[in-house]
Amino acid sequence: MPTLEKHAGKETGLKPRGEAGLVQSGTSVPRGAAAARVGYLPLPLEQVRSDVMQILTDKGAIELAEKEGRAALEKLQKGEAVSLSWSPAQPVSLQKRQGLHPEGAQAVFGADVTKLPVYAGVPAAQGRFVVYRITKVKDLTAIDPEHRKRLSKQLAEMAGQEQYAAYLASLRQRTDVKVDRKRLEGDAGR
């Protein structure tokens, strides 16, 4: 039975990599598809132990930070005192978010501000949990309920778009995929 290495070459777009005969995707697959099985060489536990421990430690720290953040948020919402270091208050609006990420903006602008202060919280990047204290609401212009609904929908769409863009960026960073735009545009006309 022929091996994959014998078929690797320009015709299939597959190239052998390294001594183990692993195969990686090439830049061009002429009018067809290529399939390959990728072999993984197991590493000894002693070699990966520190990496595994770091991953588990990071995961545990992230879960603990979120758990503690949610507990602090619950206490604050009940009116109990919590020792947190607050950044200076700064005004934010839908148009000028002052560095407020989309999830944070959604939490802040979606909070019920009938009784102040109000607290909102969301998990954030790098394993953090951010708690927001809303102490003042200034109605710049009277907004009718229909316009408020549209703004709320727009904010949700913006958050979704930014999450999708971040997801795509993380995928592109983790994979070795290159898009040949000329080829895509050439295939679109057929």
Image (cartoon, rainbow, N blue to C red):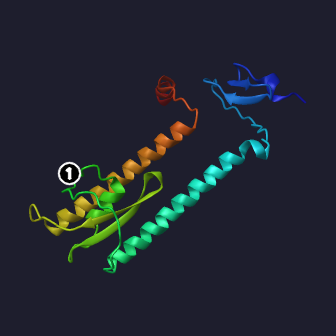
In the rendered image, the quadrant that contains the N terminus is top right
Please state the horizontal and vertical placement of residue 162, each as a whole percent of the image. Answer: 37, 48
Determine whether, in the image, residue 16 is placed left or right of residue 32. right
| 98 w.r.t. 139: above or below | above
Total residue callouts:
1
Name which residue type carries label 1: Gln
Determine whether, in the image, residue 26 is placed left or right of residue 23. left
Identify the image quadrant of residue 27: top right
Which residue is outermost to the top?
Answer: 10
Mark 1 closeness class: few <14, some 14–19, many ≥20 residues within 10 Å? few
Please state the horizontal and vertical placement of residue 71, each as a whole percent of the image. Answer: 43, 73
Secondary structure of the residue carrying tag 1 is loop
Identify the image quadrant of residue 103: bottom left
Determine whether, in the image, residue 86 is placed left or right of residue 15. left
Q: Residue drawn at (58%, 36%), measured in percent from left and top?
A: 175
Q: Residue drawn at (24%, 67%), measured in percent from left and top?
A: 134
Per the image, the residue denoted by label 1 is: 95
Which residue is outermost to the right?
Answer: 1
Please state the horizontal and vertical placement of residue 88, each as a whole percent of the image. Answer: 23, 57
Identify the image quadrant of residue 117: bottom left
Q: Residue drawn at (85%, 28%), measured in percent from left and top?
A: 3
